[in-house]
Image (cartoon, rainbow, N blue to C red):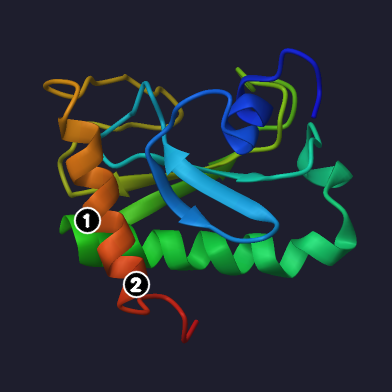
Amino acid sequence: MSGGCAFCAIVTGDAAAHVVLETEDLLAFLDRRPVFKGHVLLVPRVHVETLPELPAALRDGFLAAAQRLAAAVVTGLGAQGSFVAVNNTVSQSVPHLHLHVVPRTKGDGLRGFFWPRTRYADAEEPAVYAARLRAALADGVGEDA
């Protein structure tokens, strides 16, 4: 863990998050400031700051988890598709590698790389979104990719 890293604190359980997917090497949880509700962040449990620093042994699992999450936002949330992105250093609000999986629907207003943020209606709503995504993942969505 890197001292003061918000995502390392989530990985160790020192900070709360609505966890969607857990593996030995990876953790996925809802973004606290989502572009759209159900916006997921995928992080390696080991602290690395950028994609080029991701150990080779984690690459396949990281991409496989991203595929599963992209499928889960469609199946679990009824999105028409997803936007998947990784920032390296520039525009990276937390210096810990994280992949965004943002649910998308036609006409949702997302244009280019301008990312307006939304809020959950209350403290309970993120738990509902996380549960829907976990259920889709538990049903094996995206495992055939």
Q: Residue furthest bottom?
A: 144
Where 73 falls versus 39 (above or below)?
A: below
Which label belongs to residue 138?
2
- Marks 1 and 2: CB-CB under 8 Å? no
Determine if residue 80 is in view.
Answer: no
Q: Residue at x 29, y 56 (%)?
A: 133
Quadrant of the image occupied by residue 78: bottom left
Please, what secondary structure does the residue beneath circle 1 have? Answer: helix
- Kind of residue indicated by mark 2: Ala
- Determine whether, in the image, residue 58 is placed left or right of residue 124: right
Name the N-terminal-most of marks 1 and 2: 1
Q: Residues within 10 Å of mark 2 (few under 14, many from 20)?
A: few
Q: Amino acid at mark 1?
A: Arg
For the residue labelled by badge 2, is the local secondary structure a helix, a strand or a loop? helix
Rendered location of residue 116, percent (x, y): 32, 19
Q: Is residue 78 left or right of residue 83?
A: left
Q: Residue at x 16, y 32 (%)?
A: 125
Residue 4: image location, x then y, percent: 72, 13
Residue lying farthest to the left in this orientation: 121
Q: Residue at 46% across / 28% down in the picture?
A: 113
